[in-house]
Amino acid sequence: MFETSKKNKLESGFIIGIFILVITLIVYYICHALELGTMSIVIALIFSIGSAWASYYYSDKIVLSLNKARPATKEEDQKLVNILDALMITSGLPNKPRLYVVDDLQPNAFATGRNPQNAVICVTTGLLEKLDYYELEGVIAHEMSHIKNYDIRLSCVVSVMVGFIVMLSDLFSRALFWGGMKDRDSDGKANGILMLIGLVFLILAPIFGSLMQLALSRKREFLADSTAVEFTRNPDGLISALEKLENDSNQLKTANNATANMYIVNPFKKNGKKKTTNIWSTHPSTEDRIEALRNLKY
C-alpha cells in the first residue's frame, strides 16, 4: 500500500511537469501568432505554471462542478453517511471524506481530491436507490481505496489538465481556421503555416489527452477492488454492485471524456453491448474485475 502511494505521488509530479511543458508550447504558439515577440515565452511560462497550480489546488472543485454535484446531507442520505462512518474504522484514513451526490439515474460513483486530507466521494442518486446496503458498502470501500492509495490525486489532476489542454487547443484551432486572429500579414504562406500548426494541435491534443489518461493504469481498479474487500471482508457485495452497474442502461447526463476515467465503471453506455478491455480502455472490463474478486474468495 505504501509503495503504491509513493509511486502515485511521483507519477503526479511527472504528469504535472509534462502538462506545464505542453501548455507552454501551446500558449507560446498563440502569443507568437499574435506577434508578441520575445514576451511570448515569458507569457507562456507564467500561464502554464499558473494553470498547473490552479489545476492541483482546485481540481476537486472543478470536477464536482463539471458533474453538477451537491453536498450530501445526513437527513436525506443517512444510509450513505452510516456506511462511510463504519468504513472509516477499517480503512485507516486520517480524515473523513466529504460526501457529494449527483442527481442522475445511472448508478455510479467516483472519488476526487488532491490528498486524503482533502478527499471527496461522490455518488449518483441512482446508486443510492438501486443498491442495497452491502452493495453500496462495496462501492464506497472501493472509492476509499482510491483515496488511501493517492489514486485520486493522479486521476483528478490528469482529468482537469487534459480537459484544459484539449479546450485550449480547440480554441486556438478555431481562431486560426475561422479568422479569430487578426491578419497582420498579407502573405498567405505565413497564414498557411499558422493554420497547419492549429491543425496539428487540433489532431494531437485529444490523442495526447487519451494517452495521459491511460497513464492511470487499469491495474489501479483491480487494486482498489481488492483493497475494498480488505475493508469490508465481503467480496459478494462489490461483485453484486458491479453486476448491477454494468447491466444498468441509463446514460449519465453529466458524463464527459475528461472525467470518465474517475468513475467506478465507465459512465458511457454502448447500447447494451458487452465491453471488453483494450489498450484505449479507461477501465478494465467489469467481467475481468468480477472474476478477480471471485478468485479472492478461494
Image (tube, rainbow, N blue to C red):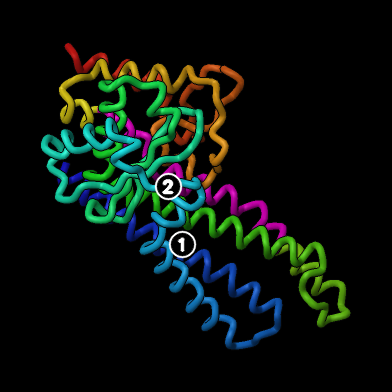
**Disc 2 crowd, CA 10 A, few/some/many (<14, 14-19, 20+):** some
x and y percentages locating residue 5 in the rendered image: 22, 48
Of the residues tagged 2 and 1, which is closer to the observer?
Answer: 2
Q: Secondary structure at mark 1?
A: helix
Residue at x 72% of width, y 58% of height:
199
Which residue is drawn at the image coordinates 32% and 20% (left, top)? Answer: 132
What residue is disc 2 on?
A: 70
Which residue extends farthest top? 298
Query: Of helix, strand and loop, which mostly describes the magenta segment?
Result: helix
The answer to whether residue 66 is left or right of residue 80 is: right
- Reply above or below: 205 against 268: below
Secondary structure under the numbered disc 2 in the rendered image: strand
The image quarter containing residue 252 is top right
- Where's residue 265, x and y in %? 43, 30
Asked if residue 205 lies in the magenta stretch, the reply is yes
Q: Nearer the viewer, residue 188 or 137?
A: 137
The residue lying toward the viewer, choosing from 83 and 240, is: 83
Q: Which mark is residue 19?
A: 1
The count of marks equals 2
Q: Where's residue 105, x and y in %?
A: 50, 29
- Residue 17's image quarter? bottom left
User: Which residue is nearer to you in this view: 80 or 231?
Assistant: 80
Most distant residue in the bottom direction: 38
Task: Write down the region rendered in magenta.
Answer: 198-225
Image quadrant holding the N terminus, namely top left
In the displayed structure, would residue 243 be above or below residue 52? above
Q: Label 2 is placed on what type of residue?
A: Arg
- Dot 1, crowdedness within 10 Å: few (<14), some or many (≥20)? many
